[in-house]
Image (tube, rainbow, N blue to C red):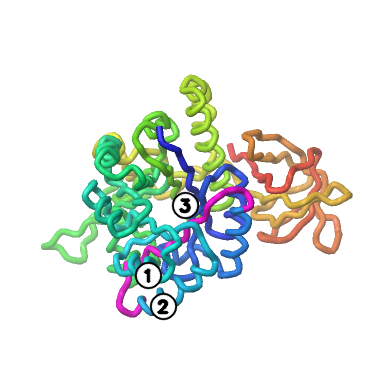
Amino acid sequence: MRETELLVPASSLEVLKVAVIYGADAVYIGGEVYGLRAKAKNFSKEDMIEGIRFAHEHGVKVYVTANILAHNGDLEGVKEYFKELKEIKPDALIIADPAIFMLAKEICPEIERHVSTQANNTNYGTYKFWYDLGAKRVVSARELSLEEIKEIRANIPDDLEIETFIHGAMCISYSGRCLLSNYFTGRDANQGACTHPCRWKYAVVEEQRPGEYLPVYENERGTYIFNSKDLCMIEHIPDLLSSGIDSFKIEGRMKTALYVATVARTYRKAIDDCKESEDKYLANLDWYKEQIAACTYRQFTTGFFYGKPSEESQIYDNNTYNIGYTYLGIAGAVNEDGYFEIEQRNKFSVGETIEIMKPNGDNIDVEVLGIKNEEGEDMESCPHPKQKLFIKLNVTPDEFDILRRNEP
C-alpha cells in the first residue's frame, strides 16, 4: 500500500484554513488567473502567500492550478505569473497545456509539475510521456476504472504519482472538456468561465419541425438530460487504497467551508480507520455515509470506477441539491466574556438550537445564548449575510469549529 494523500479544494483563504484544520494533507487553489474556476473567489497574491504559510505551519502542501488550455495571447501572461509563483513557492502547479507545462519547467523548475485531468490521461503511455518531460504526478481522467488505474500503476515508474478524483461533481462531457458553455453563452469552459449548461433544462427539436420544442417529461418540472449524479467513493475506501492511487482528490473549488469541512473530515477518518483496520472502517461505515449525506449533493454514483456508468448515473427530473445542513459560520477566538466572532452566512436566532461541528468528528447540539453586533448591541437574530457578529453559546467552541443547523 502506497502513502495516501487526501487532497481538498479551497475557494478562498478562509476555506483553505478550514480544509487544513479538518484533515487535508494537501490543498489545491486557484490564483486570480489561468485556472479553470474563474467564478470561484480564488486567491490574490497576498492571500496565496498567507495560505501557503498557514498550510506549511500545519504540515500541509498547497498546489496551484494553472490548467486552462492556452491561446496565443495567454502565454506572455503565464510567464509573468510563473515568475510570481516562483517567489511565493507553492508545492506544485497543476497544468493541462503542454506549452504551459514547458514554461513552468523553464521558469520555476523547483516547483513540482502535476498534469491536470483536463489533459485526458487515460493510459500508461501518456503517463510515461509526461514523466519523461518532468512531471511528478498525473491526474487520471475520470473515465478510468479501478482496474485500468491498477494497470497504469503497474506500467509506470514507481516515483510517478497518480492522483484521482474520488468525490464531487461529475461533468457530463469528456473529462470536463465541455463545449456547451462556449456554444450557448460564448463563455469558454476550458478558459475557466463555465456556465454549467449541463444543469439546464432541455427539450428536443425534430429536424423537419424547427421551432417546435418537444419536452421529454419526467415530472411536471421537465427533464434534465445532462445532469449527472455526484461521485462518492466513501463506501469503497479499501478498493481505493489497494489501487495504487497516491492522492485522493475531492472536487469542489466552488463549495462552501461547511462542504469542504464535512467531506475532508469524513474521508480523513475513513482513510485512517481503514489503514488501521478494515474491520474498524466497516464498523464505522454508517457514520461516514451519514456525514457525507449531510453535505449538499445531487445523489451519488461511483462514476467509472466499476465500469461504464448506466442511465442510473443521471438525474432526469430535477437539477436541485439535497441539503442536510445550513452553514451558519466559523467560530473565531473567544473573548473574556465567552463571546466569539463569526461572519454569519445564514440567519439564526437567540434561543435556537444549532450544532457545533468539530474537526475530530464530534457534532454537539448547542443553544444560542446571545448575539451582539460589532457595536456591542444585543440582537435577537442575525438576518444580514456576512455580518460580523459576536456569539455566545452554552458550550464554548474552539477556533475553526463550524456552526451549522440541521435541516430535516
Whichever of labels 3 and 1 marks the residue nearer the N terminus, that label is 1
What percent of the width, then of the height, locates residue 18? 61, 50
Query: What residue did someone put label 3 on?
Result: 252
Q: Residue at x 22, y 56 (%)?
A: 204
Q: Residues within 10 Å of mark 1 (few under 14, many from 20)?
A: few
Whichever of labels 2 and 1 marks the residue nearer the N terminus, that label is 2
Q: Residue at x 56, y 70 (%)?
A: 45
How far is mark 3 from mark 2, CA to CA?
A: 26 Å
Q: Amino acid at mark 1?
A: Glu
What percent of the width, then of the height, locates residue 162? 36, 45
Query: What residue did someone put label 1 on?
Result: 106
Find out whether residue 58 is within the magenta segment. Answer: yes
Q: Amino acid at mark 2?
A: Gly
User: As drawn, is 329 to the left or to the right of 212?
Assistant: right
Query: What residue did someone put label 2 on?
Result: 77
Nearer the camera: disc 3 or disc 1: 1
